[in-house]
Image (cartoon, grey):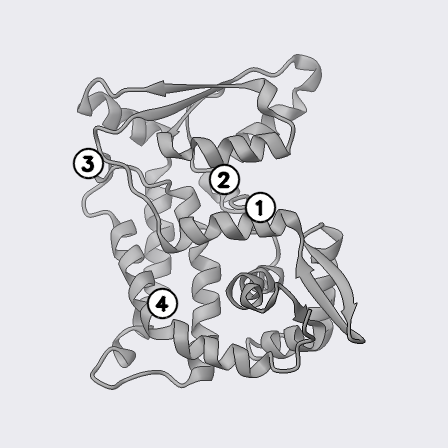
Amino acid sequence: MTIEESTDRLDGTDALPRQQQLIVSLFGLYARQRGGVLAVADLIALLGDLGAEEPAVRSAVSRLKKRGLLNSARINGVATYAPSEQLIRLLQEGDTRIFTPRRAAAGDAWLLAAFTVPESQRNLRHVIRSLLTRRGFGSVTPGLWIAPEWLFDSTWNELERQGLTGYLHFFRAEPLGDAEIRDRVENAWNLPALQELYCDFIDRFDPLLSPWTGPGERPPDLEAYRAFVPLVTLWRRLPYLDPGLPLEYLPDPWPGQVAADLFRRLTEVLEEPAKRHAESRLSTTAAP
C-alpha cells in the first residue's frame, strides 16, 4: 500500500470529505465539554465561519450519521447531534496521538504482527493491511508488519472491534543491530513520502506563526478559529502515519520534529482565542 493510499485511511475519519473531517474536529474540540452535543444551527454557524454553505453542512452531517459516526436527537425541541461510541473512541485516542505524540528510542522493543488469511477470505487481507497502515505499522513482508511496541493496545482494540483478532499474532522483538534496524525502517516505511507530507504541513502553516509570536501579538478570535480548526484537522493524520519512530533511524534532519514543534507553538497561540470564538457561536446549543 502506498502512503498516498494510506493517508486516506488513518484514524477512521480521514477518509471523509473535507467538510466531514472539519465536523469531526469540531466535535473533538468543542462538543465534549458541553455534554458531547452540538445543535444543528451551531454546526451551520461554525462551518459557515470556515467557508461552508448551509446545504453542504447539512449534507455532511447527514452522511456522518449514515456512517455511524453521529447520532441525532431533539433536546428541548432543538435538533442536535452527538458523537457515536465509535467516534468517541476515535476522538479519545486522537487526543493522545495528536496533542501528546510519543517517540520510541533506539533501544526500545518492537512489535511484530504476523497474519494469515484463508484463501476463501482473501478480501480480509486488504482490510487488515489497511488497518495496520493507518495504525502506523510498516510492512516487512506482505504478512509481517512492524511498529513501536507501544502501539499494541490501540491496535488490538481496533482489531477486536472489527472481529479480526483471530487472524493475527503479535510478538515482542528486540533490536539486534542499529544498521540492520535502520535498513528495515527504510524498507518498511515510505520515509520520503512522509517527509513530503511534513514539509507540505510546514509550508502551509509556518507563515501563520511569525505575525502572532511577538510581544503582545495575538490573533483576533475569529481569525484564530479559522486557522486552528484546519490546523488540527490536517495535523491529525500525521502522528498516525509516523508512529514515533526513533530519530536515530530517520533521515537527518527529520521534518517531523519541525512540524510537531510548529503544531505545538501554533496551538499555544491559537487554541484559546479559537475556543472563545467557538463558544460565542455555541451559546444557543440545547442543554442535554
Q: Disc 4 marks which amino acid?
A: Thr
Q: Secondary structure at mark 4?
A: helix
Residue 55's image quarter?
Answer: bottom right
Q: Nearer the viewer, residue 31 or 134?
A: 31
Quadrant for the C terminus in the image: bottom right
Query: Cβ–Cβ below 8 Å for labels 1 and 4?
Result: no
Is disc 1 surrounded by few (<14), some (14 to 19) or many (20+) residues within 10 Å? some
Judge depth for marks 2 and 4 and give the one in front. 4
For label 4, the residue is 267
Q: Which residue is mark 1?
A: 12
Instruction: Give the Cα distance between marks 1 and 2.
Output: 8 Å
Disc 2 residue type (three-letter): Arg
**Could you say which is closer to the camera, residue 221 or residue 76?**
76
- The answer to the question of whether label 2 and label 4 lie on touching residues, with beta carbons closer than 8 A, is no
Q: Which of the numbered marks, if any, corresponds to residue 248?
A: 3
> Residue at point 18% right, 25% down?
178
Label 3 – label 4 distance at C-alpha:
27 Å
Give the CA distance from mark 3 to mark 2: 23 Å
* Secondary structure beneath label 3: helix
- Considering only order in the chain, which callout, 2 or 1, is on the residue closer to the N terminus? 1
Dot in front, 3 or 4: 4
